[in-house]
Each structure stands twice: as structure tokens, then as C-alpha cells.
Amino acid sequence: MSEKQIQEESKIPYKIYLEENEIPKQWYNVRADMKNKPAPLLNPGTLEPMTAEELSGVFCEELVKQELDENTAYIDIPQEIQDFYKMYRPAPLVRAYCLEKKLGTPAKIYYKFEGNNTSGSHKLNSAIAQAYYAKKQGLKGVTTETGAGQWGTALSMACAYFELDCKVYMVKVSYEQKPFRREVMRTYGASVTPSPSETTNVGRKILAEHPGTTGSLGCAISEAVEVATSNEGYRYVLGSVLNQVLLHQSVIGLETKAALDKYNITPDIIIGCAGGGSNLGGLVSPFMGEKLRGEKDYRIIAVEPASCPSFTRGVYAYDFCDTGKICPLAKMYTLGSGFIPSPNHAGGLRFHGMSSTLSQLYHDGYMEAVSVEQTSVFEAATQFARVEGILPAPESSHAIKVAIDEAMKCKETGEEKTIVFGLTGTGYFDMVAYEKFNNGEMSDYIPTDEDLKASIDALPKVNK
């Protein structure tokens, strides 16, 4: 490293914060810059593209507009949402100096930390937006699903702020593993039901077909949608997958890019964990926009659990977003809506499919994907916690694992690459998982080709 580089390096603070007035005033819609747009949602009855009128029976009207908008690059963030963001944003971009030193790597590692709020994750960015639009429409309340509980927690906070009723269907395995996450939701006024449950028609059907099932996000989505559509004054809101969610989460990437630009830093590799796509899409969107416009090139990596590998082992096809098959069909990388993953400890990454926007980008070769086993994920999480002082969520730790892998490759080659990853939240409600890892009781389950074949073979036949 030259003397000039050393001097420039010394000017970069440990944590890069934007000023309050630098918080984004608009969300960025990456679809506006995509040549190949994501395929439209299909009506499950007619298999024709869903209209705004049809979607408005499930989602809030303004959110439907955002869901269908493929051409507006920047959408104004309402002032009330901006004011709420100021409670916990901007989030810091942190240079992982201690991790770099521990690894002995020439790579420069940065992480965008989204855990500085009571929900413990990035999910609040979209929860407050969706609750705002529900309140503006005059609704009584909303329903939703939650996996690890971070989305349910964020939505319960947002609904309390706007005085809306909040009904949460929590994946049963997470409901049992994370009772304190459940109690946070209840403290904020939400009702929390383990899914699948006996409280809905679709829940009873799933339990009859899969007795003793630990549930999945697809199951919980089905129940939440049924309750929303059968109760007047309610709408369903989703914490990931949808275009509107990726739009709201773009504040993560916009802040990250602004912080990097402040110090003339250009990342080589951008890494995010991938379940439904909210965090990954939010982090990479503005960088992906530059890539799509031919302005810059980045290596973008999606990291998913080996137990639920929709990108790396799924198929690109139309599929139901829910196990009960009552939601619209989306064209995405999927393992089949009937696939119920093993009860791994990354509850937020246990969805059978992936965002249609990210699926299109992956299909077109703009990013790559890897799957990792959970014991190696927790090894990386422990290593990170011991040197960086943050206990990471299991979901985020998938990104940490691959960031460490890439940094070690730099150690082998001597390359000084700049790596940025998303630290989506904290793991303080995931201590059962850490306990099992510390006790040596954690195992890895990777579905066989036969395990996946049954659900993939049952994909709906759509000639589009």
C-alpha cells in the first residue's frame, strides 16, 4: 500500500454515519432499470395477470400501485414515514477492522448494520410504510406471517404507532423456539398464533395432510391471507418477496452507497442473505441499478441455507407463494409451494421461493448464489461476535460466512478487495440456536433430490 493510500485509509472512520438530512427522501425501484421486467403475478383461478382491482382485495391500494409500478425509478417517501425513519436511521456502515485483523486478510470488510431498533432488524423499514398506507386507507388492521419473528415484531411496532390491529401467524417451529420474540409482539399489542393452526380452514387442511408439521412461511402466509380476506376492514401485508417490500428496503442500499461515496469507496463484492429477498434486494438495489445501466460492475452474491436452497437447487417457474395455494402465482426460483424445510434456526430464510424481481436478475446473470450449511454459519457467527462485539442473527450470519470465505480467498491471492455485506439484525432472541451450537447438538440437513422432486413435480402447469 502506498503512502497516499495509507493516508486516505486513515481518514475512514470505524463507523460511517450519514447526517440526518442525508437520509434518502425517495425509495429506488430497481425494476425501472431492468430490461427484462419480472413476470406478472397471476390470478390462481384464471392464470391471467392480476389486475390492480383484484390485488386490492388483499393488499392496501397504494401498495398495489407500488407493486405494479415497473417504470418509476424513484418514489417519494411520505413525510410521516421519513419522520419515523429518523428514530433509528441512518444506520451505520461499519468497517470490520477487528475481523480483518483476526483473519489476516488484505480485504477491506464493511457491514451495514440494521439492528439498532427494537425489532432488531431491517424489517421495520417496510413495516412502518405498510402500516402507514393501511392507516391512510382507513383500515381497522392488518394480518401477516412471520418466520424468525423479526417481521412480526416490526409490524407490531408499526401498528402500535398507527393504532392498527395486528394479527400475526408465526411459523410453529419459531413460535416454540423463540417465545420471547412472541412476547415482544404481544407487548406491542399484536395477537400471535402458531402456524399451521386450527383457527383457519387452510390451517386445518395443512394439519390434516401433514400431522405434526413444524410449519413454513408458506403455511403462515396462507392463514394470514385467509383471515385478511374474510374480515372486513383488514388487509394482508408481507415482510418479504413482494416488489413493494424491496422498494421500501432500498433505503438500506441507498444509505450504504451514500456512505461509501462519501469516502470514495467502491465495493468489489456485495453479499446478502436470501430467504424471500427483502434484505438482499434492499441492500443491492442501487448497486444493481448501476450495473443494469452499464455504469459500474459489482460481484453480487446471494447466500441461502442449504436446507432451503431455492436459488441454487430450485427451478425458475410460476408457483404459488403459499402452501394453501390461495395467493397469486409468481414466477420465481422455487422448491415448490408444498416443500416444508427442515426446522433449521434461520427462520427468516425458510421460504420455498424467492422474490420475482431477484429471480429475474439471477436468471439474467446479474448476480450469483451459494448455499451454506447451518453449522458453518454458526461458526462464522461466533467468530464475528467474538471480534466485532455484535451477536448476529442466524439469517445475517449466512452473509457473514460468505464474507469471511471471500476475505480468506483474498488472503490466499493477496488481492485487496472491498467486501460489503448486510448485517440484517441481532440474534438475542436466537439463543436456543446458539445453545445447540455451543453444546455440539446442531446438525445439518440438506434435502435430497428425491425430497425436492415431489414438491417440484407438483408445480402448477402454467404456459407463460
Image: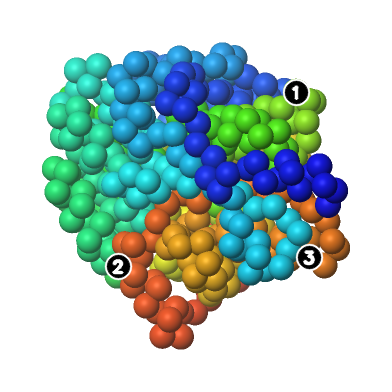
Q: Marks 3 and 1, how far apart in space?
A: 32 Å
Given the image, on which type of amino acid does mark 1 rest? Arg
Q: Residues within 10 Å of mark 1 (few under 14, many from 20)?
A: few
Q: Residue at x 33, y 72 (%)?
A: 432
Q: Residue tagged by mark 3?
A: 411
Given the image, on which type of amino acid does mark 2 rest? Gln
Does the CB distance between marks 3 and 1 fall below 8 Å?
A: no
Q: Residue at x 53, y 67 (%)?
A: 387
Q: Residues within 10 Å of mark 3 (few under 14, many from 20)?
A: some
Q: Residue tagged by mark 2?
A: 177
- Where residue 280 appears, as percent x and y from the top left, is 56, 43
Does the CB distance between marks 2 and 3 fall below 8 Å?
A: no
- Where residue 375 appears, as percent x and y from the top left, is 53, 74
Residue 293's label in the rendered image is: 1
Residue 366 appears left or right of 212: right
Nearest to the observer: residue 387 or residue 382: 387
Q: Which of label 2 and label 3 is nearer to you? A: 3
| Residue 179 seen in this snapshot | yes
Q: Secondary structure at mark 1?
A: loop
Q: Which of label 2 and label 1 is nearer to you? A: 1
